[in-house]
Amino acid sequence: MNKKAITFGVTFVIMTILIVGIAIYSFVITQKDNLKYTISAEALLEYEKEIENFQIYSEESLNLAASQALQDLASKSLIEDKNCLVYNYKLIWDENCLPSNLKDLFFEKISVNFRKHIKDYSEEYDLIIEKQEPFIYVNDIKLKNQLKGEVNYSFSHTLYIKQDISKYLEILKELDEIYIKLKNAQTTCANSNIAVCMKQKIPLNHWTLDVIEDASYLSINLKTKEKFFFVSGGSLVWDNIKIQALI
Amino acid sequence: MYKMNKKGTLGRFSHDFVAFIAAFTVVVFFLIMVSVFVTGNNKTISQNSEFLQEKIKEKVEIRNLFNEKIVIDNQEISFLELVRLSITNTDYKQKFNENYPNINIEKKEFCSLEENCIYLPSNNLILIEILKIK
């Protein structure tokens, strides 16, 4: 074989290896870039999804916190932190133990319940709850979350929620001075069918009232006409909210 | 004219021919590499764009559902409240299917980006996938 052919052949092989090598290298590098763009798009979607999910979650939490607050009050016969007498597992309403400050108690409970739900979502959070009837505002809900996928980034977002709670306030309003109303009706209805008479004397739009004689007491059973979501016995139920007490 | 040389090795004809074939192979290979790269690139960008558009469209459709109200047991409830009821109670699951025959909901442990999932508050977090069947 002549020398020229050998030189040519060797040079050609080296050049070929170089060109193919460069082509493969550029191909791999660009594919990596493409992968980065794909991952970035996915990360962006993931971020947007997280914000939207948190917004929905917060709104739902506020609704659930309100209905749970009503149930929490009802389950304690509308009495908080008072020493009351009990008969047959039922609390006795009297002059020293009567429902009061229901609206304030309701707001306190909403705040506690809402914070509990937000804590379930994220360990690290911050928020301000304000009331301005008939709305409740949750300002500056700051959530921090570390999303881990192929791209790690820190998630931080601030939300604002405004929720109309007029429905709950109307329901609570009917219970304002309920003890006095019941006592007055009891006196007026003394000489008639007390259960029927008391129901007539206390007209309610959001509650149904049942009065049953129980020993020397009257057993008062109030039940919401509407059903609500609340946690009872560790599980979430959709049911009427009930209040039981004796007078 | 191309002739065999005295040593019996190939002459000028064979050199040119080998060089031509080799050069041709390299150029063709290089062009194939470039076309694969360009097509792959465009396909990825196009797929990304379609994927994003599809996801946004689905999201808007499902978000609109959240504003809907349904009457159950003579009471008006929201779509998400019915979702919450239907995952815990088979009777309400049936009512959900009657109201939304083209929507499937499922309680999940984990959701990928492709799935439309939301968290609902309860005594624990509930992760739900909402799938609109076309």
Image: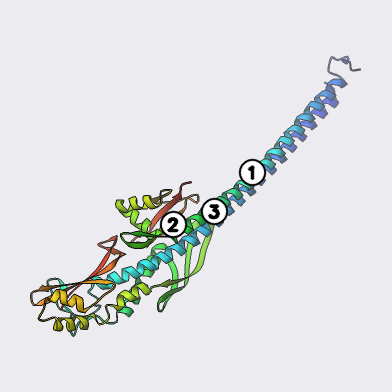
User: Residue A41, how many percent across, how many down?
Assistant: 58, 53
Instruction: Identify residue type, mark 1.
Output: Lys
Res. B43 mark: 1
Vertical arrangement, residue A95 with respect to residue B22, above or below = below
> Disc 3 on helix, strand or loop?
helix
Same subunit, labels 3 and 2: the answer reads yes
Tell which of A197 and A116 is nearer to you.
Answer: A197
Query: Mark 3 highlights which residue?
Result: B57
The residue carrying pointer 3 sits among few (fewer than 14), some (14 to 19) or many (20 or more) residues within 10 Å by Cα, namely few
Q: In which quarter of the image is the N terminus of chain A?
A: top right
Please give the name of the residue rendered at 40% of the width and 55% of the height, measured from the top-left corner.
Answer: B127
User: Residue B73, how many percent across, how many down?
Assistant: 30, 59
Which image quadrant is residue A72 in?
A: bottom left
Same subunit, labels 1 and 2: the answer reads yes
- The reply to whether dot 1 and dot 2 touch (C-beta < 8 Å) is no
* Horizontal side of residue B61 vs A73, given as left or right: right
* Horizontal side of residue B41 vs A131, given as left or right: right
Q: Distance between the residues labelled 1 and 2?
A: 31 Å
Instruction: Identify residue type, mark 3.
Output: Lys
Q: Distance between the residues labelled 3 and 2?
A: 16 Å
Tell which of A112 and A177 is nearer to you.
Answer: A177
Q: Nearer the viewer, mark 3 or mark 2?
A: 3
Instruction: Identify residue type, mark 2.
Output: Ile
User: Residue A220, how many percent across, how many down?
Assistant: 17, 74
- Report in which chain the residue with disc 3 lies: B
> Disc 2 on helix, strand or loop?
strand
Query: Mark 2 highlights which residue?
Result: B118
Vertical arrangement, residue A129 with respect to residue B27, above or below = below
